[in-house]
Amino acid sequence: MRVLALTSSPDRRPGLRALGVHPLLGNLDNVGSLRRLAGVATRVMHLAPPPGEGAGGDAWWQDPRTVALVRVLRLRGKPVSLVYASTSGVYGDCQGALVAETRAVNPATPRAQRRVNAERAMRHLGRAGVRASVLRIPGIYAPDREGGTPRARLQRGTPVLVNEDDVYTNHIHADDLARACLAALWRGRPQRVYNASDSTHMKMGDYFDLAADLYGLPRPPRVPRSAAREQLSLMLLSFMGESRRLDNQRMRKELGVRLRYPDVALGLRGG
């Protein structure tokens, strides 16, 4: 089986070849560079995020990268299956409820709205005969990668919310996510959505307390939401404004994913 990877950086090609991957030079922001993908791949993993804030003008809610990819894949020899890495942020604030994939999306931020647009493009491709799967992914961590754990944030002393204002947060270890992606690529049901999360149900402040204890660092200060608005960035506040607990049963039962790190404490101990 030949593995191909789209990259916009010529400098990455030697590294990809060293891993046994055949690089294809192209850019999702340049539709013309994508035509070489048509008819090439039988199974596609789409991991690229939408453009950031301020992109797209009046069409700020669209993901032009995913739309461009879908158009190219429809040109000839459509792939057998496709997996799109979306975000659990498409659910919006669920006030701590347990969320299954059947829950209606309710995106509250521009980045989540662009993800919903990308998911719809995937389903459009699915109606054209491609077995498309959508993974809704929460926070990804990886102790063996730079910036892959809360260590740096703990060292900065960034505050978290007091318990009565706190929100539930969800995570998945990068290795478990990779296994979920491959399982969906080969076993995902047509046009199916999967919550790609571990089995931990924990509030955000408790998560950072756990990490601090594991790393021998001071626990972060706790502040009320009113004080957080004055101390934290809009990006961090947006994560603190949504609370949900992801139900991962569909991923485990339908895809047969056996999590190596079902509890976030197990995964963080490596960092």
Image (cartoon, helix red, strand yellow):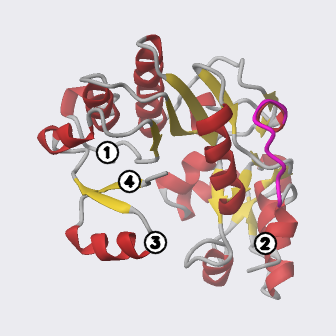
Cα distance in 3D space between marks 4 and 3 = 11 Å
Relative vertical location of residue 186 with respect to residue 214 in this rendering, above or below: above
On the image, the x and y values in percent for residue 11 come to 24, 74
Q: Which residue is mark 1?
A: 51
Q: Which residue is mark 2?
A: 268
Kind of residue sitting beneath label 4: Leu
Kind of residue sitting beneath label 3: Leu
Q: Which residue is mark 3?
A: 19
Q: Earlier in the sequence, mark 2 or mark 1?
A: 1
Say which mark, if any, is on residue 4.
4
Q: Quadrant of the C terminus?
A: bottom right
Mark 3 neighbour density, 10 Å: few (under 14) some (14–19) many (20 or more): few
Kind of residue sitting beneath label 2: Leu
On the image, the x and y values in percent for residue 160 come to 71, 63
Front of the two marks 3 and 2: 3
Q: Quick check: marks 2 and 4 in contact, CB under 8 Å?
A: no
Kind of residue sitting beneath label 1: Pro
Front of the two marks 3 and 1: 3
